[in-house]
Image (cartoon, coloured by chain):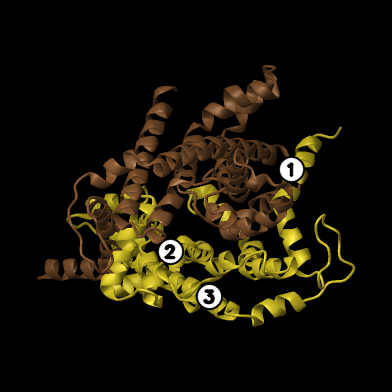
Chain colours: A brown, B yellow
């Protein structure tokens, strides 16, 4: 009797979250796969079409170019974010005064939206023509993304640096290690877990870049900034190709999983 | 040179780059009339006219109200539902607990774009298209909030819970008079993060509402064409969209940066 009441209580406490996750996370996760193998039409029923959506994506030039565009964005955004975050974190650690003020200023863009950053930067960049240039547009979007988001990575890395025992750095200094050697051989190895975390989180974010693309370029010029996330939106809401959009979403999901698994292995292998 | 001078110089430069665009945004928004703004010339006087003008035109006030509703209701609902679940996930043993934790964790690895289409199908089935229900409820499934709260509640000393048990307190009493008060610092930080996430959210509000009256500020701002507005009006709209976040941030930044440093939460 007591046990039954106990499990009833557990259920009641879990119920809101269970319902929310069942309806809006787990069901859509199944639905994503389901839609990607169907030719769903809003209000017009659906039919199982097997891998047809994926097969047509494999020959779809727009999708294939969005794939390489996204990889290009990731290739600029992730290293740049980690580099900027790491160097500002090291500087924050080294600066003897005003640390709180610098930290606040550097983190401020993180508190606003990518849409806001996009609108303001679009306006600032308009006269430069960067956004109209097919080979400059993607790096430009990546830089805006870094400007907006590096503060988060910076804080995680800064916390990592503070966890490095001061004795280690001091000992290296006494042994005559230069600042660069101390960074390379003491700090960086100690920061591995933090760097791994940041790389995984930022890679996830980079693969999903959407807001700035939507606001600043609409995928252009000549699809030079047409990313996978933008393709999901475009296929679904401009072409009303729900199956195609779902298939791109599932492809994006698979890529993100694959990449994070690869990253995990890479970090585990080289100690 | 004094020790630490170089880091300070470099950090000053980076800080200027970080907050520069906001300063430009504010200055342009407060510039009177059609003051030439590119290249950025400082205006001789400042005015609030543009902000008032933008707020009074079109649906801007409505978008602002929608954004406030979206953010505030979400904060309350996420904190309540997550803390309830986190309590039993942290303090009770029951069949399927580990499975539940792992499946929640797994949702954090799914790009939202993959769930976009199926979520809209669910919303359509529920008859929630273009409603506040459709806008708000699907965003309340927040694995990060549940997991962060669970981590915190699990670290609370067992004695507190044992003592309550001995006193004959039921689970609701324990939840209301022990868990919630003790969790106040995490709940406060989480409240700010959920507020910022929802205030700044874009993709979901963009796709779930088709009517102008269901737009949030980010969606509304994205529909404004720079061609149809003066720079001052566009930057005023941007200011109204961003200022609440920047203010919340300025007031609470110590708190927020500390949380990220300790837990990595907030991504």
Residue that lies at the very extreme toward the top in this rendered image: A175
The tag earlier along the polypeptide, 1 or 3, is 1
Q: Find residue A51 and report its horizontal and vertical position in percent.
A: 22, 44
Q: Chain of mark 1?
A: B
Q: Find residue B52 and report its horizontal and vertical position in percent.
A: 71, 80
Residue wearing tag 2: B204
Q: Secondary structure at mark 2?
A: helix
Asked whether B243 or A32 is in front, the reply is: A32
If the image is split into quadrants, where does the C terminus of chain A sit? top left
Q: Residue at x 38, y 73 (%)?
A: B177
Tag nearer the camera, 1 or 3: 3
Mark 1: give few (<14), some (14-19) or many (20+) Cα within 10 Å.
Answer: many
Tag nearer the camera, 1 or 2: 2
Q: Chain of mark 2?
A: B
Mark 3: give few (<14), some (14-19) or many (20+) Cα within 10 Å.
Answer: some
Residue wearing tag 3: B68
């Amino acid at each position: 009797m007591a046990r039954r009441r106990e499990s009833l209580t557990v259920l009641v406490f879990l119920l809101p979250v269970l319902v929310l996750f069942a309806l809006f996370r787990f069901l859509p996760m199944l639905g994503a796969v389901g839609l990607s193998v169907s030719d769903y039409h809003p209000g017009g029923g659906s039919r199982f079409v097997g891998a047809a959506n994926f097969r047509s994506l494999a020959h779809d030039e727009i999708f294939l170019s969005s794939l390489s565009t996204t990889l290009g964005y990731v290739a600029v955004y992730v290293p740049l974010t980690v580099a900027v975050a790491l160097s500002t974190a090291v500087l924050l650690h080294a600066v003897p005064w005003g640390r709180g003020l610098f930290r606040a200023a550097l983190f401020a863009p993180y508190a606003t939206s990518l849409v806001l950053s996009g609108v303001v930067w679009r306006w600032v960049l308009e006269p430069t023509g960067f956004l109209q240039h097919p080979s400059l547009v993607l790096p430009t979007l990546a830089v805006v993304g870094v400007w907006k988001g590096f503060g988060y990575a910076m804080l995680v890395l800064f916390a990592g640096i503070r966890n490095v025992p001061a004795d280690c750095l001091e000992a290296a200094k006494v042994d005559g290690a230069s600042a660069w050697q101390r960074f390379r051989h003491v700090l960086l190895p100690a920061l591995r877990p933090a760097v791994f975390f940041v790389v995984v989180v930022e890679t996830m974010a980079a693969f999903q870049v959407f807001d700035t693309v939507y606001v600043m370029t609409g995928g252009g010029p000549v699809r030079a900034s047409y990313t996978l996330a933008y393709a999901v939106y475009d296929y679904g809401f401009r072409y009303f190709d729900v199956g195609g959009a779902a298939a791109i979403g599932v492809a994006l999901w698979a890529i993100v999983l694959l990449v994070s698994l690869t990253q995990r292995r890479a970090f585990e292998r080289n100690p | 040179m004094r020790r630490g001078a170089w880091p300070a110089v470099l950090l000053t430069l980076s800080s200027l780059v970080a907050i520069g665009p906001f300063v430009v945004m504010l200055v342009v928004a407060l510039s009177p009339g059609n003051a030439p703004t590119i290249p950025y010339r400082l205006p001789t006087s400042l005015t609030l006219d543009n902000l008032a003008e933008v707020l009074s035109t079109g649906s801007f006030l409505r978008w602002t109200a929608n954004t406030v509703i979206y953010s505030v209701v979400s904060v309350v609902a996420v904190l309540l539902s997550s803390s309830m679940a986190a309590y039993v996930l942290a303090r009770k043993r029951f069949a399927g607990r580990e499975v539940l934790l792992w499946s929640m964790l797994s949702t954090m690895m799914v790009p939202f774009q993959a769930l976009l289409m199926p979520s809209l199908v669910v919303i359509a089935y529920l008859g929630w298209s273009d409603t506040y229900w459709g806008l708000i409820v699907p965003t309340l499934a927040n694995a990060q909030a549940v997991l962060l709260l669970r981590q915190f509640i699990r670290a609370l000393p067992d004695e507190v819970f044992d003592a309550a048990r001995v006193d004959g307190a039921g689970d609701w009493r324990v939840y209301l008079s022990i868990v919630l008060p003790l969790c106040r610092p995490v709940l406060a930080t989480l409240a700010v993060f959920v507020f910022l996430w929802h205030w700044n959210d874009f993709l979901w509000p963009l796709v779930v509402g088709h009517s102008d009256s269901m737009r949030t500020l980010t969606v509304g701002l994205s529909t404004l064409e720079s061609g149809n507005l003066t720079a001052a009006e566009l930057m005023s709209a941007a200011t109204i969209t961003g200022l609440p976040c920047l203010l919340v941030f300025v007031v609470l930044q110590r708190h927020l940066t500390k949380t990220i440093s300790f837990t990595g939460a907030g991504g």
